[in-house]
Amino acid sequence: MITVIKVPFLGANDKSARLVSWLKEPGEQVCAGEVLCQLETTKTLFDIDAVTAGYFYTELSNQSEVAEQEVLAIISDAPLADYHNVIQQTVKAESKSDEAEGQQLFTQKAEILANRNKLDIGALARELGRKVQAQDVKDYLARTTMQPLRMGFVQRERIGIIGGVSGGGALIIIDAILRQPKLQAVAVFDQNPAFVGQEILGVPVVGSADDHLQQYLADNKIDKVIIGFNRNLEQREQTFTRLSEQGVPFCNIIDPTVEIRNQVKLGTGNVVLSNVYIGPCSEVGDNNFITAGTHLEHGNKLGSHCAFGPSVSTSGNVSIGDRVRFAAGIVVEPGIEIGNDTVISSGAVIVSNVAENHVVKLSYTQQIKVRDLSNN
């Protein structure tokens, strides 16, 4: 006879535990009530006891991560010559049993709602001790999500900003972050020593990313980063590529006033500031800096590492390459293609394609003189 030892229900906040250590060796004879191992969750450390006497067997090692209801071990009433095969067969049988049991533990509507909200409905059924209805799932979600909000406990994503102090990029990014309760600006990494020790809207400037970023990540002080500078687009691209290859996680900073329409594909590392519009079925690459009031119409395709000044407006189906710099107040006609490494000056109206590595510059004169008030 084989008795199965499983990971018990771990509570509402844990779906897995760490197997700290086995106190018995495979094949060792155990008595009912003897401690077999210790499990550790985020909140507690507890023992797993033998439910019957017999011979103990397991394939799991110390420090393993184990899921709720996973098979920990078996106890046989007689010694086993090939316990590995017996454990594998037991795991398969228990899996089929759990699947069949699951069909009786919750309704189809409850399962759909739980899956949509990434809730372990099996654990909820064991907690309730009965078949789970859709209303049970709704009540659980309301209890576990609304109560922390009422108490002011909101988990925020902690952001580090790389550069952009002198040009103002860090300032407007922090301003956008402060308007979003689920984001928190933690530090600005800037290589100019004159700024170190100062604060931007309450966020400290701590020194260069090369010197401090990896330590902030290792100390779990930040979750993701965003690049704040946009004057040198080649350097912006190099920084993004180098840090990405190092495994540094990037985020998008999107101001709450931004309007993103249907079927838009958005990369990572993008800064999208106030009152930007991105039309339906558009594509935006990585690491772009899109300033306030920019309007990208439907079907646009924007590459990566580009920078926009205020109030740039593109018509439908415009294609823009990589490392393209737009100044302010620019209009682009429908279907235009703009190549890589292009610079477009303020006030330009683009009515024909622009090849890569070109500059579009307006030729006009401007005269400024003192007003003659003698006739007033």
Image (cartoon, rainbow, N blue to C red):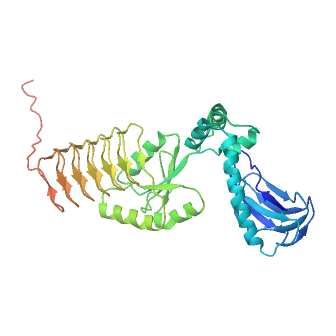
Q: Residue at x 9, y 43 (%)?
A: 367
Q: Residue at x 74, y 37 (%)?
A: 130
Left or right of residue 100, residue 45 in this image: right
The single residue placed furthest to the top in the displayed view is 376
Query: How far from the left and from the top, in percent, is residue 278?
Result: 31, 42
Name the quarter where the C terminus is drawn: top left
* Up-down relation of residue 144 to residue 238 (above or below): above
Is residue 63 visible from the viewing direction of this image? no
- Give the camera-side residue of 53 and 166: 53
- Where is residue 19, by image quadrant? bottom right
Name the quarter where the N terminus is drawn: bottom right
- Give the camera-side residue of 188 and 155: 155
* Up-down relation of residue 373 to residue 113 (above or below): above
Query: How far from the left and from the top, in percent, is residue 303?
Result: 29, 56
Query: How far from the left and from the top, in percent, is residue 144?
Result: 66, 38
Left or right of residue 255, residue 282 in this image: left
